[in-house]
Image (cartoon, rainbow, N blue to C red):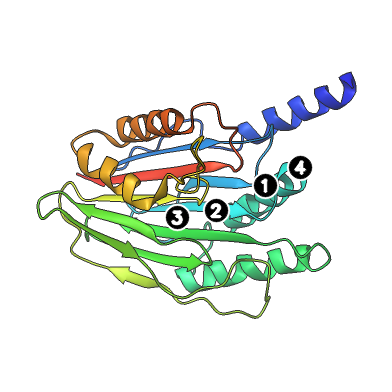
Amino acid sequence: DVYKRQAMNLAMEVQQNLLPAEMPIVKGLDIAGHSIYCDETGGDLYDFLELCCRDSDQIGIAVGDVSGHGISAALLMATVRAFLRARVTKPGNLSEIISDVNRLVAHDTSETSQFMTLFYAEINPSERSVSWIRAGHDPAITYIPDSDTFDELKGPGMALGIDDNYVFHSQKLTGLKKDQILLIGTDGLWETKSESGEMFGKERLKGLIRQRAHLSSQEMIDEIVDALRAFQQSVKQEDDITLAVIKIN
């Protein structure tokens, strides 16, 4: 009915305003992100975070995916975003930040058994390093064009909201190369299906990253979204799709 439709449109507008309105300008980095929701509202999140008590050129990047769809997923997405934004304004390393956020999320989800996977990274361009925590989320993909090598930013970690006592441990990669690309996505990206039921897959995604490595982060995202659309054709999108691309300048 009309009121329900208006309410959904309002919820969609509110949530769209939670996604970054513009991409951050960080010396030494080229950063872009994009979300496509399969319903009016969704459970995917990406955010770029100004960090307390770090070098001014450091930035936090979060990509997350709430279990389920619709309004309940959107509410948890908004909650996690708020917890994370509040927490990074205070001192603490990655492990402390994500462990604190998880504790708050777990208190909220104890009745609903919802959870959220999250990939949280902090990039230090002057140190040419990235530190990250993988809270049940797919590893980020990294590509070095000069050597034509792919790798993944792996590591242990449980989804947020499952165990309030879980202690997260961060990983670190140093020696980031010029033009190196980091892509953090949600599984809706590689699990997008074609009319024949085939999945888009990570190999196809890597092929696109390799072919488009010379482009800016935003152009690469545009090309990936176009490729997804062409692959999908008339198939309805079943899951939210989110990706953030970071290029080392």
Residue linked to disc 2: 64
Q: In this view, does 5 lie to the left or right of 159?
A: right
Q: Which residue is drawn at 76% across and 65% down?
A: 113
Q: Can residue 29 be seen in this view?
A: no
State the image coordinates of residue 59 (x, y, percent, origin top left).
38, 52
- CB of mark 4 within 8 Å of CB of mark 1? no
State the image coordinates of residue 94 (x, y, percent, origin top left).
46, 68
Between the residue at mark 2 and the residue at mark 4, the CA separation in whole angstroms equals: 16 Å
Could you tell which of marks 2 and 3 lies nearer the N-terminus?
Answer: 3
Between the residue at mark 2 and the residue at mark 3, the CA separation in whole angstroms equals: 18 Å
Q: Residue type at mark 3? A: Leu
Mark 3, residues whose alpha carbon is within 10 Å: few (<14), some, or many (≥20)? Answer: many
Between the residue at mark 3 and the residue at mark 1, the CA separation in whole angstroms equals: 19 Å
Q: Which of marks 3 and 1 is in front?
A: 1
Residue linked to disc 3: 51
The answer to which of 58 and 202 lies nearer the viewer is: 202
State the image coordinates of residue 212 (x, y, percent, origin top left).
23, 36
> What element does badge 4 sit on?
helix
Residue linked to disc 1: 78
Tag shown at residue 71 = 4
Could you tell which of marks 3 and 1 lies nearer the N-terminus?
Answer: 3
Q: Which of marks 4 and 3 is in front?
A: 4
Tag shown at residue 69 = none
Q: Is residue 228 visible?
A: yes
Between the residue at mark 4 and the residue at mark 3, the CA separation in whole angstroms equals: 29 Å
Mark 2, residues whose alpha carbon is within 10 Å: few (<14), some, or many (≥20)? Answer: many
